Image: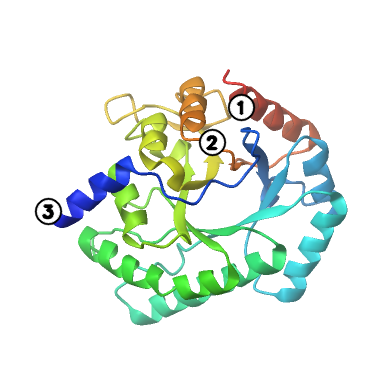
Amino acid sequence: MNRREFIGTAAALTAAPLSPAYGDPAGRPKKSVMYAMLPGSLSIEDRFRLARDVGFEGVECGPVGSEARATELRRAAEKAGIPIQSVIYGGWDAPLSDPNPAVVAKGIANAKSAMQDAKWMGAEDILLVPAVVTAKVRYQEAYERSQKNVRALIPTAEKLDILICIEEVWNNFLLSPMEFAHYIDSFRSPHVQAYFDVGNVVTFGWPEDWIRTLGKRIKKVHLKDYKGGPGLFGGNKGSFVMLREGSINWPEVRKAFAEIGYTGYMNTELGGGDEAYLRDVSARVDKILAGE
C-alpha cells in the first residue's frame, strides 16, 4: 500500500459509506437461517415454514443455476411467509485469484450465475470469497487479481441490483479489519460491501474490533461461535461450537453492532437439525440480540 492509498484508507475508516445496512429501521437486526440447516426430509415449502415457525425472519440459500429451481424456491418461501434474503455462493471452487485464466473465467461465470439466482429468488446479495492465498499464489497476486476480477462483476451487480458481499474466511486473505475495509473501499462501488462472519476471526482477532472498524460496510452477518482465542495468543487451537458456548464476548459484539447501527440479517451458519434443535438455535440468537 503506498502513501496515497494509506491516506485514503485512513479517511475511509473515519467516514461511513452512504448506503445504510439492510434491516428493521427500528434498530433490531433480523434473524436468518441457512436453508441447508433445515431438515432435508421435509418438502421445500415445509422447510421454509419451519424456519418461520421457530422464529427466523429470513433464509439464506445456495446457488441453483436454474431459473425454474430459483423460482420454485422463491414461491415456496413466499407461500410460507419468509423471504430468501441472501445467496451463499462462496467461490472456493474457482477463486478469482487463481493464476489460470480458465479457472478465473469459471469463477466469474459462477458468480454472475449466483447473482442471477439471487435476483430470481428475490435475495439482496451474494456472499463471495474473492481470493485464496497459497504457497503458489502470493498475497499480493491474490489481492491484485481478485480486485481486477471483482471489478469485472460490478456491471452485472449494478444491472441486477444485487450486492456482492465479500466475506473474511480461513483463506489466508484479508487478515486485519483495516485491510478488509480498504479492500472494500478500493472498489468505490455501493454494490461491493462486506459480509462479516463473527466466528471466523476469533483465532487471530476480536470480532467487536472488526465490527467497529468495518462499520456500515457490513451488510450481512454470519453467526457462529469458536472456542479458543480470541487472538493468536489466546489459546487459538480450538474449534467451532454452538452459539454462546465459545470464546466470543457476545454482549460486546452486540454492543458493537448497535454502535454501527447494524439492522440487517444475522444468518446462523451451523449444522442442521430437527425442529427442537432449530428452536434452540433461534432462542440462542434471541439472547445474543438481547445483549446476553
Label 1 near label 3: C-beta < 8 Å? no
Residue 148 circle label: none
Residue 224 circle label: 2
Residue 275 is situated, as x and y percent measured from the top left of the image, at 80, 36
Q: Amino acid under label 3? A: Arg
Mark 3 surroundings within 10 Å by alpha-carbon count, few (fewer than 14), some (14 through 19), many (20 or more): few
Residue 289 circle label: 1
Q: Determine whether 49 is above or below 157 in the image.
A: above
* Quadrant of image for the C terminus: top right
Of label 3 and label 1, which has the lower sequence position? 3
75 relative position to 147: left or right: right
Q: Nearer the viewer, residue 205 or 38?
A: 205
Name the residue rendered at 41%, 30% in the picture: 208
Name the residue rendered at 34%, 48% in the picture: 181
Q: Nearer the viewer, residue 40 or 30?
A: 30
Name the residue rendered at 32%, 35% in the picture: 204
Name the residue rendered at 58%, 29% in the picture: 242
The alpha-carbon separation of the residues under discs 1 and 2 comes to 14 Å
The alpha-carbon separation of the residues under discs 3 and 1 comes to 40 Å
The kind of secondary structure element at disc 3 is helix
Q: Amino acid under label 2? A: Lys
Residue 3 circle label: 3
Residue at the far left in the pictured view: 3
Residue 118 is situated, as x and y percent measured from the top left of the image, at 64, 64
Residue 212 is situated, as x and y percent measured from the top left of the image, at 39, 34
Q: Amino acid under label 1? A: Leu
Of label 2 and label 3, which has the lower sequence position? 3
